[in-house]
Structure formats: structure tokens, C-alpha cells
Image: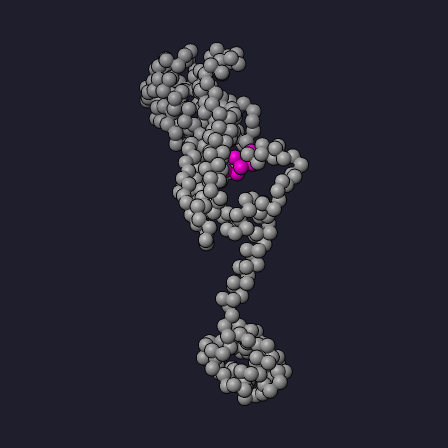
């Protein structure tokens, strides 16, 4: 890390969710220009390189091309295909699979009617596909679709699909595999103590729902890290005097927080208003705070020189006025 972090501390990442599929990430403080450097790199990876699952082909019974209309089916084949492009699927395997949709009943056909095997989940089951007319259903006919789903990255055009397609009955669908819909960011100027002109990175990530925004950011960070590491395979430090050690900084910050907490918890025993004799006895016994006094037992106080029964009663009364007591006192 930049040597400036010895002064400003390690950057803190905070996350807040606007919805299940949208989250805001704020990283600060950063050295000047590091905000845009990190944001731009993460954004490019998230939009181009994260794998996702999409529909790339469909077979419609009785349809030979996408410009047909089917008797008893409200939407044209083209409209059905366009609706299937919006299908959001979470799939763990990387193999190409075929999903089946068969329906005879009149009414709307949605993504919930698609049969899915284990390891495959449809994230938008309410997605409208088409509608079956009552007349079609009365003929005991069946609306049938075979839907091809595959996993990939980036964008795949219909021309690319044609080059490998062997089945002429498959209607090809171009696919944008990325599960990330958008990544926007702002860089704000902040300060830390006397250090000014620092960056605060404010980034909003929105996904389709097949991957959480948090996982999208983690994937992008891991991928960038794997490439950057190639420039220094031996992990050799160049000019280590100008690099900050994040571990040492965090340990220092942790120790400082403990110290600050102890200082905040320290209440001098002088405010109890004890007599000079009792106060001097406690100080000589190295009991300097109310917090330390409440941790003492009667036996411990009795062992202090010049601390007698009268002092014990005085201390108990002073503590009781504050709703406190000695350790193990009833």
C-alpha cells in the first residue's frame, strides 16, 4: 500500500444494499487518483468477464422459423423468443443443457412452467412467455418449447452461434452472458486529519439476480489480483521504505482502540468525595479508578494498609450513591 496509509490508516470498505440485486460500496480514504484507477478496473471486469447463464437457442413445436405465428397462441414465435431472452438463470455447471416447457391448459405461460433439473434455478419465474387461447386448449393440443441454456462470458452474436450450430430447427438467440447490469461510480474528495486531497470511491453495482453484487465485486477483485501478480511473481518489494504494511497498521489501530476504550472507561476515584484518609489508602493500594474499585473484593480492600472498617463503610456508601457495589457484594 501507499506510504501515506501510515498517516491515514488502512482504507475501510462499507457496503449497503438498496435491494437484493443492487448494492453500494464505499472505499475510503485512498490516495489521490487511486479511486478512479480501482473503480475503472473493477467496472471493466464486472461488465465483460463475469460468467453467466443465458438462453442461446429454442425449438418451438410446429415452428420452422421465428417469423411464424402459431394457431391458438397469442404471441408470434419472434415475440416468444424475445421474451425468453429475459430469462434469468442461475446454473452451477458449465455444460450446455436443454430445458423443457410443455403446457396444455389455457392461460398465461410463464417461466414457472419451465421444468428445471437440480443445479438450475430460474430467478424470474413470473416472466411472461406467451398465452394459450381456450380454443387451443379445447383441442387437447400442447404448447411445447425446448430451451437451450449455456454458460459463458461477454456477448455472443447469432453469427457466432450459426458457425457451430448443426440443428436447423433451432432458433438462435444472441446472448449477453454478464450477470452485471450496471456499474456506476463517483469519486469524492475527502480528508483524514491534516491530510487533504484524498479519494473516496463510491460505487453502485446492479445485477440480474443470478449473482449478488457482493460476489460480482469479489470475482472482479480476484481476477484483477491474478493478473497483477504476474508482474511480480517473486513478490519482491521494491523501495519497501515507501510502502505501508497493512498488517502493522491494523495492529496499531487495534491497539489504539483498546487504549482509547480504557481511557474512556477510567473514572478517577476522587469524584467519589471520600475522606482524605480513605482516598490516600486507596491510592497507596494502586486503586485509582471507580472501575478498578468495583472489581475489588472486601478481602482485597481489607489487605490495604490503613484501610479499616470505617473506610470500608465509607466506600460502600459512596458506591451505592452511584448504583455500584464491590465485587461479590450482595
The residue lying at 41 percent from left, 43 percent from top is 188
Decide: is 271 above or below 187.
Answer: below
Placement of the N terminus among the 4 image quadrants? top right
Q: Position of residue 15 (x, y in %)?
A: 46, 45
Residue 34: give x, y in percent of width and height.
48, 40
The answer to whether residue 32 is visible is yes
Residue 69 image offset from top left, x and y in percent: 35, 14
Q: Is residue 147 in view from this perspective?
A: no
| Point 51% across, 29% down: residue | 49
Q: Residue at x 42, y 33 (%)?
A: 182
User: Is 259 within the magenta?
Assistant: no
Closer to the camera in the image, 293 or 231? 231
Could you say which is closer to the camera, residue 291 or residue 175?
291
The boundaries of the magenta stretch are 217-223
Q: Above or below — where is 253 with respect to 18?
A: below
Q: How is the image coloured?
A: one colour
**Picture coordinates of residue 62, whole percent (x, y):** 41, 13
Q: Between residue 304 and residue 70, name the one nearer to us.
A: 304
Please tell me whether the stretch drawn in magenta is mainly helix, strand or loop: helix
Q: Is residue 100 left or right of residue 132?
A: right
Residue at figure coordinates x 57%, y 83% from the top left: 281
Give the number of marks: 0
Amino acid at each position: 500500500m501507499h506510504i501515506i496509509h501510515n498517516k491515514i490508516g488502512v482504507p475501510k470498505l462499507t457496503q449497503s444494499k438498496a435491494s437484493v440485486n443492487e448494492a453500494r460500496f464505499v472505499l475510503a480514504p485512498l490516495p489521490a487518483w487511486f479511486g478512479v484507477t480501482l473503480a475503472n478496473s473493477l467496472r471493466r471486469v464486472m461488465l465483460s468477464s463475469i460468467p453467466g447463464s443465458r438462453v442461446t437457442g429454442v425449438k418451438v413445436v410446429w415452428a420452422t422459423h421465428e417469423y411464424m405465428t402459431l394457431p391458438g397462441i397469442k404471441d408470434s414465435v419472434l415475440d416468444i423468443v424475445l421474451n425468453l431472452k429475459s430469462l434469468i438463470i442461475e446454473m452451477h455447471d458449465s455444460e450446455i443443457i436443454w430445458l423443457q416447457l410443455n403446457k396444455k391448459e389455457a392461460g398465461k405461460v410463464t417461466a414457472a412452467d419451465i421444468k428445471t433439473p437440480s443445479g438450475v434455478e430460474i430467478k424470474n419465474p413470473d416472466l411472461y412467455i406467451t398465452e394459450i387461447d381456450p380454443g387451443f386448449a379445447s383441442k387437447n393440443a400442447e404448447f411445447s418449447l425446448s430451451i437451450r441454456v449455456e454458460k459463458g462470458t461477454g456477448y455472443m452474436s447469432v453469427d457466432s452461434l450459426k458457425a457451430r450450430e448443426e440443428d436447423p430447427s433451432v432458433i438462435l438467440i444472441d446472448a449477453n452472458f454478464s450477470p452485471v447490469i450496471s456499474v456506476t461510480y463517483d469519486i469524492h474528495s475527502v480528508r483524514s486529519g491534516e491530510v487533504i486531497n484524498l479519494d473516496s470511491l463510491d460505487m453502485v453495482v446492479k445485477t440480474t439476480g443470478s449473482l449478488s453484487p457482493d460476489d460480482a465485486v469479489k470475482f472482479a477483485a480476484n481476477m484483477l489480483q491474478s493478473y497483477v501478480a504476474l508482474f511480480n511473481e517473486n513478490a519482491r518489494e521494491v523501495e519497501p521504505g515507501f510502502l505501508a504494511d497493512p498488517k502493522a497498521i491494523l495492529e496499531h489501530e487495534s491497539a489504539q482502540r483498546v487504549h482509547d476504550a480504557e481511557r474512556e472507561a477510567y473514572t478517577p476515584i476522587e469524584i467519589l468525595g471520600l475522606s482524605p484518609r480513605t482516598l490516600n489508602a486507596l491510592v497507596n493500594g494502586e486503586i485509582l479508578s471507580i472501575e478498578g474499585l468495583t472489581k475489588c473484593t472486601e478481602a482485597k480492600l481489607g489487605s490495604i494498609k490503613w484501610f479499616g472498617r470505617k473506610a470500608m463503610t465509607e466506600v460502600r456508601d459512596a458506591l451505592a450513591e452511584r448504583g455500584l457495589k464491590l465485587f461479590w457484594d450482595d
